[in-house]
Amino acid sequence: MKVADFDFDLPSEFIAQRPAAPRDSARLLAVADGLGDFAMRDLPGLLAPGDLMVFNDTRVIPARLDGRRGQARIETTLIRQVAADTWNALVRPARRLHLGDAIDFGNGLAARVEAKGEAGQVTLLFNRAGADLMAALEATGAMPLPPYIKRDGPADARDRADYQTMFARRDGAVAAPTAALHFTPALVAGLAGRGIGTAFLTLHVGAGTFLPVKVDDVADHKMHAEWGEVTAETAAAVNAARKAGGRIVAVGTTSMRLLETAAAADGTLAPFSGETDIFITPGYRFKVADMMLTNFHLPRSTLFMLVCAFAGTARMRAAYAHAKAAGYRFYSYGDGCLLTREGGR
């Protein structure tokens, strides 16, 4: 398969710059054998009692930092934790940094350059660690919005709340699991009242989710690794729901990737803790999820490849064409899709 097979045109006016308010007023496109236009608050009626929704409970940290090396400004975005006091980061301009250089981020937070890699990547050793480092990031950093959300400067005060799901509890993500941004307490209550269950896993979303695919052939792309955990409680809930005939609804591509990583060939889910670099493309045989709630994704992205694998490329092309014609809003702060697995129940 060629990456160009997953290309499509999307004018910039379709890209949402702020989320819908309230969150569950966002639009929802149901994609199965046909297409249906709904709102997110209609979701309980599109599911059935006994279905189980699986959410990612990762919490986005303020990973965007504005630092100084002497008089030089160093824009820094943390992308992956290596140790309690060490992160891989993207910096600009990388050419101004050398091994051993110190970067001052203010508020008593500083780091030393421990290693340099390709494409502006460095390894930073901070003067804080663990919870102390997280507290310093909360005081000093900004939310790491994706590049298609435009601000005059760093993410603003509204983004502190908007770019975080209501389920966020485990620090570590540098990008939000955006499908869950649509949920409100009222919507969750509506799901519970309908007899729809909820379960949680953790996948710390990395900045690699926004990196462009630079190869021509899909098979040549190397997927970034992310840390995740499926608890014994969640594995048991998923297995029980499947055994009882309920459908498993993965909320977001992150939940989907971790479910598929932790599942056996027969679909039985096992506890898991570690890194996953699973890359799902058309032809992949899904083992766990029957449905998927997700947002509208970038052309030529690994995320669009995943939804094409799940719902069918022809279906997704038709769905995106309909969404553009109907004025849906795209990407992280945009509207949602409820996908039924192609050939599924």
Image (spheres, helix red, strand yellow):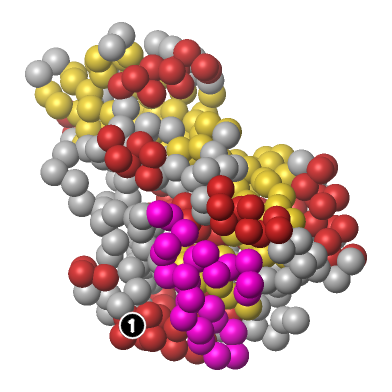
Q: Which residue is depicted at the point 85% across and 50% down? A: 236
Q: Pinpoint residue 22: horizontal percent, then vertical percent.
A: 40, 54
Left or right? Give the position of 18 relative to 127.
left
User: Residue at position x 43%, y 33% from top?
Assistant: 61
Q: Is residue 179 above or below residue 128?
A: below
Estimate how packed mark 1 is, as few (under 14), some (14 to 19) or many (20 or more) residues with alpha carbons within 10 Å: few
User: Is 118 on the left-hand or right-hand side of 33?
Assistant: left
Can residue 272 be seen in this snapshot? Answer: no
Q: Is residue 187 above or below residue 171?
A: below
Q: Which of 25 and 102 is in front in this view?
A: 25
Picture quadrant of residue 306:
bottom right
Q: Which residue is drawn at 47% across and 52% down?
A: 181
Residue 4 falls in image quadrant: bottom left
Q: Where is residue 288 in the image (x, y as percent from the top left)?
A: 75, 65
Relative placement, left or right, of 167 versus 153 is right
Q: In this view, does 41 lie above or below 96?
A: below
**Quadrant, the C terminus:** bottom right
Viewer can see residue 232: yes
Q: Does the magenta stretch include residue 44?
A: yes
Q: Where is residue 206 in the image (x, y as percent from the top left)?
A: 47, 45
**For the magenta stretch, what is the residue range?**
22-46
Say which of 207 and 102 sits in front: 207
Classify 121 as above or below 343: above
Question: Furthest-left residue in view?
Answer: 71
Name the quadrant containing residue 18: bottom left
Q: What residue type is labelled 1?
A: Ala
- Helix, strand or loop for disc 1: helix
Q: Mark 1 points at which residue?
A: 326
